[in-house]
Amino acid sequence: MTVTSTQSGAAAEDGAKPSNMRSLSRAMEVFAELQRADRPQRLSDLARTCGMSLPTTLRILRVLQDFGMVSQIDKTYRIGPAVLPAARSYLENDPLVTSSRPVLQQVAAQTGMTASLYTRLGFERILVARVDGDAPLRYDMPLGKRLPLTVGAAGKILLAGAPDSHLQEVAQAAVAAGHEPPTFSLAELKARLPEPGTDYAYSADERATGVLSVAIAINRSGLPSESIALTSPVEAATEDGLKAGIPELRRAAARLAELLEGTVY
Amino acid sequence: MTVTSTQSGAAAEDGAKPSNMRSLSRAMEVFAELQRADRPQRLSDLARTCGMSLPTTLRILRVLQDFGMVSQIDKTYRIGPAVLPAARSYLENDPLVTSSRPVLQQVAAQTGMTASLYTRLGFERILVARVDGDAPLRYDMPLGKRLPLTVGAAGKILLAGAPDSHLQEVAQAAVAAGHEPPTFSLAELKARLPEPGTDYAYSADERATGVLSVAIAINRSGLPSESIALTSPVEAATEDGLKAGIPELRRAAARLAELLEGTVY
DNA sequence: AAGAGACTTTCATTCTATGAAAGCATTTGG
DNA sequence: CCAAATGCTTTCATAGAATGAAAGTCTCTT
């Protein structure tokens, strides 16, 4: 089985290659921008931010609106209701999500901790599935939350073994997205990543204070783009206690990889 | 405040007018088709179903994939993980969703029944928010579910007062989407709609057996595109009991309309 | 192993997407 | 209340993007 990722421009574009389907790419930029700015946007804002002319932006918005991907109130645009059925379709049909449910359930039951599945998207990761453990996490993190790759066990493990050039990009993107302070450097990132030869990542108080976490990547062909994590509030676990779950986590990752591999389409 | 809906082609297109942004529109068609067929689709399937050439379809898929809207495993395509952050953005920022929460909560508390908010999308409606009542509904219906306009109180009330020509389209779309039997006619639809002058719709065993429901439309300028419903399983309510909640429902609709009207952007 | 089917690339042509500029509308400031 | 400014929308000529035929490549089937 091969998971193809074209991986060219999910994040902020630089302008290197004049890629295909310009109007469609631009429409997706507008759509992404509407999410990034989590408040209604005016036409002129979007045109400026996305670097395109007013008429073009307007035309794009109109089409997206026709399909419910964007909704308009007065002069402001925002994400529209059509994304809900789409998300439902994803959650119900993607083998990553459906296959992970029982696996996460089992590892959560075995360890008593919260088990989460993340998938990489551009230079971020998003929470795709979660099964709560005995000790609830203080913060709520609904499905679909965008999180940095640079912070937190589940993010860092996805970067293990990546070449410096790529880490550099990731570091810059994390700054651009506001996940890291403006001075964040490649060296700082590498200092946090797991040692070479280590197949898990650990984090304490990294992304959220009072939260410990270990993560393992799902091994598909090529660079990993999914990871599963065990998470616990500090008051319910120690570093050692959490790391004791790593063998289970490892098994869960292997089981999930196997499930995905065996899926027939 | 004005809610603009361009309302041209959210559903299957006929081919009347040579609308703008062809490539973008076609991309949205592909995206919609991937949701409709809730199973992985091959390139050739999509090309055939959407009526476009293989190269074009492939190019569209590649761009959508770059942005995570589509994911590919082997030779099959499906909705991708990027829809999750988008859905989150919608649920957290759309005033319809955020304003409705307290309103639904109140009406659910007052009546003891499940309160739901639907919005119209093309020729269907989708569940956008729900607060459960005392008697849980037997079926689970997650957010984002696509439901027909022709069946169920919350659907029918959105069609009250619509001209026959529009009802005709709706009836045909319901058949095309598999919501209604192939013989479903305009006359059958009109027989179920609320009498002129009635501001609520009632349904019993219509969309789901064992479920009673009343609904009221949210009154924004122009034709309504949202409705709120009270729903209960038969064993927990009678028709009269449910209809006793109509005044509360009416008040809730008015309050929500007011909240939406007052939103400043 | 050979053939059939499906996917991908190339390329010349068409027509779509584009932005400048003008025309409206709406908001702001006097 | 009017004037000026700002923001939105439409029009239109042009560039170049999007398109599908056809050839090329890969993959699965028999």
Image (cartoon, coloured by chain):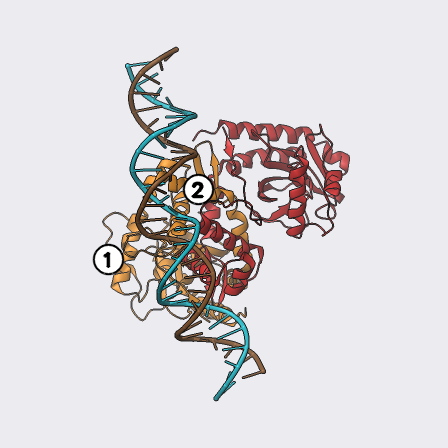
Chain colours: A orange, B red, C cyan, D brown
User: In this figure, which residue is indicated by the disc labeled 2?
Assistant: A61
**Mark 2 burial class by Cα count in 10 Å: few <14, some 14-19, many 20+:** many
Q: Percent x, y for residue B115?
A: 63, 39
Q: Image point 66% across, 37% down: which residue?
A: B159
Q: Percent x, y for residue D18?
A: 42, 54
- Would you say B247 lies left or right of A74 here? right
Q: Percent x, y for residue A179?
A: 32, 49
User: In this figure, which residue is indicated by the disc labeled 1?
Assistant: A186
C-alpha distance separating marks 2 and 1: 38 Å
Q: Element type at marker 2?
A: helix
Amino acid at circle 1: Leu
Residues at marks 2 and 1 on the same chain: yes
In this view, the residue in front, D21 or B252, is D21
Amino acid at circle 2: Leu
In this view, the residue in front, B108 or A55, is A55
Q: Image point 36% across, 58% down: which residue?
A: A155
- Would you say B49 lies left or right of B192 here? left
Task: Mark 2 or mark 1: name the one nearer the start of the chain.
Answer: 2
- Would you say D9 lies left or right of A95 here? left
Q: Image point 24% across, 56% down: which residue?
A: A188
Q: Element type at marker 1?
A: helix
**Mark 1 burial class by Cα count in 10 Å: few <14, some 14-19, many 20+:** some
Q: Is residue A103 visible?
A: no
